[in-house]
Amino acid sequence: MVEPDEGGNPPGGVDEPREMTIEFVDHEEGPHTVSGEIPVEIQAEASAPAAEGAGAQTERLQQLEDMVLRQRADFENFKRRAERDRAEVSDRARAALVKEILPVLDNMDRALAILEKEAPAEWCKGMELVHQMFLDTLLKAGAEPMEALGRPFDPQYHEAVTLTEDPALPDGAVADVLERGYLFRGKVLRVARVRVNRLQRETAEEAPNG
């Protein structure tokens, strides 16, 4: 029987520790390999939503810009319509007021016709000045008297009250103005009441040769 030595070791000496060798085998990295770089496939997939989001935002901004431009154009059109309507309402109000004042001016015309025959020249001059001031005020408001005397009768501007026969005037001409007509901004405010020249057929045929 072999006995252990003094150190208690079995015969044959102390067993030396054995070395273990670990070999590392390299493998090819695939798309799921954990490494310091992100695979190209994953980068493309990650950047796609960002690109789509930028395009959607640009389209939305363009839609909002178009909406603002349309609203601005609608507002400008609304302002123009409002200004036009306001001007029309103002013109109608002025025209109605002027039409109410015209009978006063008619009476001044009749008074002047009488004064020129009977009153002193100083009186007539003063009345003419007041009459002219009255006409100037109406002109500023947009009204103006028509010129009808001697012109051909036109039912759009004239109302025939009576007839007369004057060989010196053409047939159908306005021989006398009984009440002046007025225009307001180029439109008829009140027709003129006139006396129309009406020649007999024989006289009318002879008038050009005479």
Image: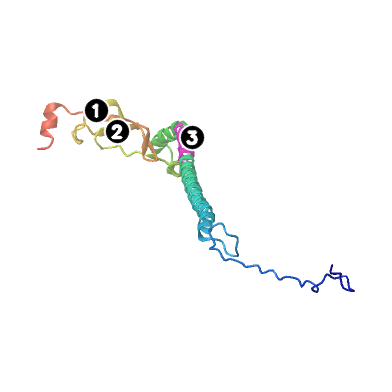
| Mark carried by residue 190 | none
- How far is the residue under mark 3 from the one under mark 1? 38 Å
Q: Quadrant of residue 177?
A: top left
Q: Quadrant of residue 148?
A: top left
Q: Which mark is residue 93?
A: 3
Q: Quadrant of residue 10?
A: bottom right
Left or right of 79 in this view: 109: left
Q: Nearer the viewer, mark 3 or mark 2?
A: 3
Instruction: Answer whether labels 2 and 1 touch (C-beta < 8 Å).
Output: yes
For badge 1, the amino acid type reads Thr
- Crowdedness near tag 3: few (<14), some (14–19) or many (≥20) residues, C-alpha within 10 Å: few
For the residue pair 16 and 19, the one nearer the viewer reads as 16
Q: Secondary structure at mark 1?
A: strand
The answer to whether residue 110 is visible is: yes
Dot 2 falls on a residue whose secondary structure is strand
| Residue at the image point whose x is 55% and y is 63% from the top | 27
Please report contact status of discs 3 and 2: CB closer than 8 Å, yes or no: no
Mark 2–mark 1 Cα distance, whole angstroms, equals 9 Å
Residue type pointed to by label 2: Asp
Q: How many angstroms separate mark 3 from mark 2 (CA)?
A: 31 Å
Mark 3 vs 1, N-terminal side: 3
Q: Point out residue 37 in the picture as x, y percentages from the top left corner.
A: 57, 64
- The location of residue 161, given as percent across then percent down, is 30, 25
Q: Which residue is mark 1?
A: 164
Q: Residue at x 18, y 29 (%)?
A: 199
Residue 167 coordinates in the image, percent (x, y):
18, 33
User: Disc 3 marks which amino acid?
Assistant: Ala
Q: Residue furthest right?
A: 6
Quick check: can you spot residue 127?
no
